[in-house]
Image: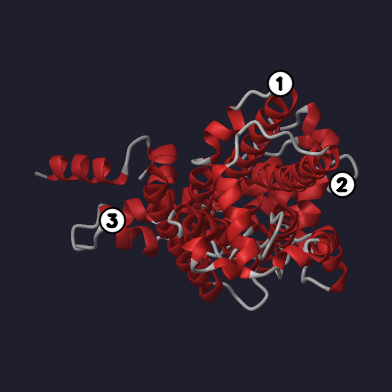
Amino acid sequence: MTHTVLGVIYFIAFSHALMLATSLYKRSSQNGAARLLSLLLVIMGYNLFEGGVLYTGLYTVLPHTMDLLPLSALFLGPVFYLYVSRVTGLRSKLGYFSLLHFVPGFMIWLYNSPSVFRSAEDKIAMWQYILTSSDSVTLQPVIIALLVAVKIHLGCYLWLSWRSINTFEVAAKQLRADDTQLVLYRLKLTVIGLIILESVWVGLFFLQQTFSINTLGSVSNIWLLFVAGFVLTFGYVGLQKPNLIFDAEERKLTEHGSDHRLEKAPPKNSASDKVKYFHSALPESTLDVLAKEVESKLHNDQLYLDETLSLTKLAKLTDIRSHTLSQVISQSMNTNFYKLINGYRVQHAVGLIEDSGNSWSLERIAFESGFSNRVTFVKAFKEVIGCTPSAHKKQFLSKQA
């Protein structure tokens, strides 16, 4: 009965994985990174499908749908890493070189091809043996080494992905004024969760094979529940910004500033400020002039109302080099791009809220002020004004009464 319930849950999770993958694919641009994330969801979804077929006993009816992708972790790692590489601008597009990441997976698949294409009777017998075998079965050293190597392979790709995401999460406030940092933060937490999950598996596997402790067997039945959770998380994060990609100029700025931890603007004339811009030939007087020009351009042309405005886009609109503009914002304005742009947006929103002739909802005010979603709007509003938009509206109305 327990297995049947788990099987139904896995089928439900599988259907959600397919829906999320389809939605991500459709909402992504042709060369968008989210299409790779949708492929990741399909692979993880197939694992859930196998679990559903196995635990509901349908493997006796659908034997040839099982074991089509042995050791799928060899594909999960490269696919996710290529997704992160696309997001962070490391690869503007995926070429034939990217296929090299899948060589281990294809080699294992070819090695297991006799098992993949075995008869229905043999597959049914294999899965029946797996369901009824003892948890304390000791595997051959070669098999143990292979399984551990697969987990290490996945772990390496996850670590490389985490490192890239972490770097861009730190730099996001210098480059974007939307919820990019929040999306990257959630994605980073998901990767950390996967690394922990895989580490736990290796630890339990070691205990089982070395000391015959059935810890791995006791959790194997619900292992795919964690996979289902990660499927939903990846899908949710991906749908927040399906076309999230940092361009080459943003990557260049990020790589330049990654050693200086740019999440906080340094105090004016600080030592770190001088280290970061030691090669700049611009005097402070020139930077101050450029700062006034940027403020004038933002105010007069209301550039902040563009929800897609980024540092590199603003640099083009103001005819200032991206690195110079970053220096102007950090040194002369003593802030970062996120706070600068959202400060203008919040003041614009305050004007709309306090306009007695305006009956717009806070949701519409957020979009009309340049915010891409309500979450970013509320967060920025609280940082600038000190309270939520709804609280500010109530306070203003009470004063008017």
- Which residue is painted at 37% across and 64% down in the image? 368
Q: Position of residue 130 (x, y in %)?
A: 60, 47
- Which residue is painted at 69% across and 42% down in the image? 166
Residue underneath mark 2:
280
- Which residue is painted at 73% across and 48% down in the image? 161
Residue 124 visible (yes or no): yes
- Tell me the mark number nearer the camera, choosing from 2 and 3: 3
Q: Position of residue 15 (x, y in %)?
A: 44, 64
Q: How many residues crowd around disc 3 within 10 Å: few (fewer than 14), some, or many (20 or more)? A: some
Kindly identify which numbered label has been placed on residue 380: none
- In the visual, does 12 lie left or right of 217? left
* Three-letter code, disc 3: Leu
Q: Are marks 2 and 1 in contact (CB under 8 Å)?
A: no
Residue underneath mark 1:
211
Image-quadrant location for residue 147: top right
Residue 321 visible (yes or no): no
* Three-letter code, disc 1: Phe
Q: Earlier in the sequence, mark 3 or mark 1?
A: 1
Task: Check the image and name the residue furthest to the bottom.
Answer: 30
Residue underneath mark 3:
362
Image-quadrant location for residue 215: top right
- Tell me the mark number nearer the camera, choosing from 3 and 1: 1
Q: Position of residue 247 (x, y in %)?
A: 72, 64
